[in-house]
Image: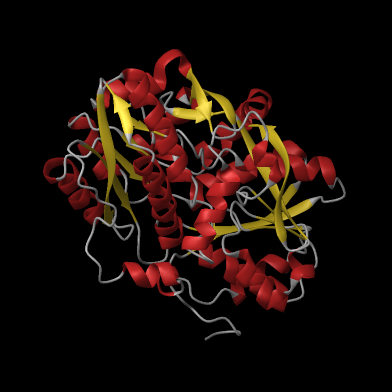
C-alpha cells in the first residue's frame, strides 16, 4: 500500500472474476445441431482485464438471450451461438497462439478483440486467413488490415467530444495537464486530447507518459498539479490507473475539472473520495440505465433491460466495455440474417454494404482512410457523460465527423508528432 491506495488487479476484485478462475472454457455452449461460434480474444486477467472480462460478461447475456429466443436464422437454417473465450493477458505472443487456436481448432466465424498491444501479429494472421475480426481500437487499423473492423468503439477519436463539450459549457477552463501510460492505448489518445484541447483554445501545460508498471501515482499527480491546471486529463489510462490517479488528486487537494476517456467502477471510487469530489467528472461511457439510451436513434435492443440483467448477474463489474462486445454482436447477427449466410466474408460484406450502417448511438459511416488507412471504422455520434450527484449521466450526443471536418489537420499533426498515423505504425 502506498499513499493509502492498495495495488490490485481487476480479476481479483469481483465475484465474476473469481468465478472465471479455475473453470474450463468456453462457458457458454449449447447442444444445438448447428452452431455459430464467436471467438473472444482479449485480456481476462491482469491490469487490462477491466476492458476484457466485463465485455465477455455482457456478451454472454446477449448470447443467452439469442439462444433462448431460438437462435439466429440464416439460409433456412437455425444456429445457436457459442462463445469461445481465450485469455491473452494482453500479451502479443499469447494473442497469436489464441488466434491460431480459435481459427484452426475452434472454427469461429468472428473474433472479437480489445485491440492494442496484443493485436498486430494476430490481425496479420487473420488477414492472411480471411478471418473477420473486430476491435475497440481503430488505431489497430492500416490499409492492410482488410477484415479487421471497429464497428462499435472508435477510440480514441471520440474523446474530442468530451473536450468540445467542456469548452462550450465551461469556457472559464483555460489550461490542462495530461498523463497516460506509454502504450498503444495511451499514445494515440494523448494525440487526440492534444488536438481537441488546441481546437478548443485550451493550453496544455503538462503532458507526460508514465511506465505501464507504475505502482505509485502520487508523484504523477504531484507533477501535474505543480503546473496549476484547470483540467486534469487522465487520458485512456487503464481502469485501475484512472481510479488511483483520481484518488491521488483527491488526497492532494485538487479542486478543478477532471476529464478522462473512462471512469470504470466509479461507485467504488466515490466510496473513497466522496460524491462531491467527482461531481462534474467528464468521460465517454454511459451506464445503460440512462434514459437517453431509450431514444429512437439508439440501435441496441432494450439497453435498460440489458443493464439490469448485467447488474443482477455480475454486480459491481460494469465498465466501459460491458456493452460494447454485445453491441458488435447485435450488428454481426443482423449481417448474418441480411446475408442469409454464415460465411464470414459474406457477413463482412453485409456489414460494410453501402458504406453506412446502424451504430449503437445512431446510424454512422464506415470511415477512416485518412486517419487509419482504411474505411473499417463505423463513425458517427458519441455521448458525453458527466457524473451528476454520484451517477453517470449522458449530457449530449456530439458528432465526431463534424469535429473532424473542422479540425482534421490538428488531429493529423498530433498523431504524426507521436508516431501514431497509420503509415507510421505500419512502417
Q: Nearer the viewer, residue 10 or 177?
A: 10
Q: Nearer the viewer, residue 319 or 238?
A: 319
* Residue 363 position in % (x across, y down): 57, 24
Instruction: Give the left or right position of residue 98, taking residue 317 as reference.
Output: left
Instruction: Give the left or right position of residue 363, taking residue 47 as reference.
Output: right
- The mark total stands at 0
The residue depicted at 79 percent of the width and 58 percent of the height is 230
Q: Is residue 252 above or below residue 237?
A: below
Q: Is residue 337 above or below residue 110?
A: above
* Residue 33 position in % (x across, y down): 17, 38
Farthest residue in the right direction?
Answer: 172
Residue 221 visible in the shown view? no
Farthest residue in the top direction?
Answer: 354
* Residue 26 position in % (x across, y down): 24, 55
The residue depicted at 21 percent of the width and 51 percent of the height is 98
The residue depicted at 77 percent of the width and 45 percent of the height is 166
- Location of the C terminus (image quadrant): top left
Residue 113 placement: quadrant:
top left
Residue 205 visible in the shown view? yes
Q: Nearer the viewer, residue 142 or 297?
A: 297
Q: How is the image coloured?
A: secondary structure
* Residue 357 position in % (x across, y down): 49, 22
Amino acid at each position: 500500500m502506498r499513499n493509502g491506495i492498495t495495488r490490485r488487479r481487476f480479476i481479483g476484485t469481483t465475484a465474476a472474476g473469481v468465478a472465471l478462475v479455475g473453470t474450463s472454457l468456453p462457458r457458454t455452449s449449447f447442444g444445438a445441431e448447428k452452431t455459430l461460434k464467436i471467438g473472444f480474444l482479449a485480456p481476462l486477467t491482469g491490469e487490462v482485464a477491466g476492458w476484457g472480462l466485463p465485455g465477455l460478461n455482457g456478451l454472454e447475456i446477449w448470447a443467452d438471450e439469442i439462444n433462448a429466443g431460438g437462435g439466429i436464422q440464416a439460409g433456412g437454417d437455425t444456429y445457436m451461438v457459442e462463445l469461445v473465450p481465450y485469455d491473452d493477458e494482453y500479451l502479443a505472443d499469447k494473442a497469436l497462439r489464441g488466434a491460431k487456436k480459435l481459427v484452426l481448432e475452434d472454427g469461429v466465424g468472428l473474433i472479437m478483440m480489445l485491440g492494442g498491444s496484443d493485436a498486430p501479429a494476430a490481425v496479420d494472421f487473420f488477414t492472411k486467413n480471411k478471418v473477420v475480426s473486430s476491435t475497440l481500437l481503430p488505431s489497430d487499423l492500416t490499409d492492410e488490415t482488410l477484415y479487421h473492423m471497429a464497428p462499435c468503439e472508435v477510440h480514441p477519436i471520440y474523446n474530442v467530444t468530451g473536450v468540445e463539450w467542456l469548452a462550450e459549457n465551461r469556457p472559464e477552463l483555460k489550461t490542462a495537464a495530461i498523463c497516460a501510460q506509454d502504450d498503444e492505448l495511451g499514445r494515440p489518445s494523448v494525440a487526440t486530447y492534444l488536438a481537441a484541447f488546441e481546437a478548443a483554445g485550451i493550453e496544455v501545460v503538462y503532458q507526460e507518459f508514465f511506465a505501464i508498471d507504475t505502482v505509485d501515482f502520487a508523484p504523477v499527480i504531484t507533477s501535474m498539479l505543480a503546473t496549476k491546471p484547470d483540467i486534469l486529463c487522465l487520458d485512456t489510462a487503464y481502469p485501475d490507473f484512472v481510479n488511483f490517479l483520481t484518488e491521488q488528486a483527491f488526497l492532494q487537494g485538487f479542486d478543478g475539472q477532471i476529464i478522462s476517456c473512462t471512469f470504470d467502477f466509479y461507485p467504488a471510487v466515490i466510496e473513497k473520495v466522496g460524491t462531491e469530489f467527482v461531481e462534474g467528472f467528464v468521460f465517454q461511457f454511459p451506464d445503460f440505465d440512462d434514459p437517453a439510451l431509450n431514444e429512437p436513434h439508439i440501435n441496441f435492443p432494450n439497453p435498460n433491460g440489458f443493464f439490469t440483467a448485467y447488474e443482477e448477474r455480475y454486480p459491481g463489474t460494469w465498465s466501459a466495455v460491458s456493452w460494447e462486445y454485445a453491441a458488435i454482436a447485435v450488428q454481426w447477427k443482423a449481417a448474418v440474417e441480411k446475408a442469409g449466410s454464415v460465411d464470414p466474408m459474406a457477413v463482412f460484406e453485409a456489414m460494410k454494404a453501402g458504406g453506412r450502417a446502424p451504430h449503437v448511438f445512431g446510424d454512422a459511416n464506415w470511415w477512416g482512410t485518412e486517419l487509419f488507412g482504411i474505411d473499417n471504422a463505423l463513425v458517427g455520434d458519441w455521448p458525453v457523460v458527466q457524473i451528476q450527484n454520484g451517477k453517470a449521466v449522458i449530457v449530449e450526443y456530439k458528432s465526431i465527423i463534424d469535429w473532424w471536418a473542422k479540425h482534421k489537420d490538428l488531429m493529423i499533426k498530433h498523431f504524426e508528432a507521436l508516431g501514431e498515423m497509420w503509415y507510421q505504425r505500419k512502417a
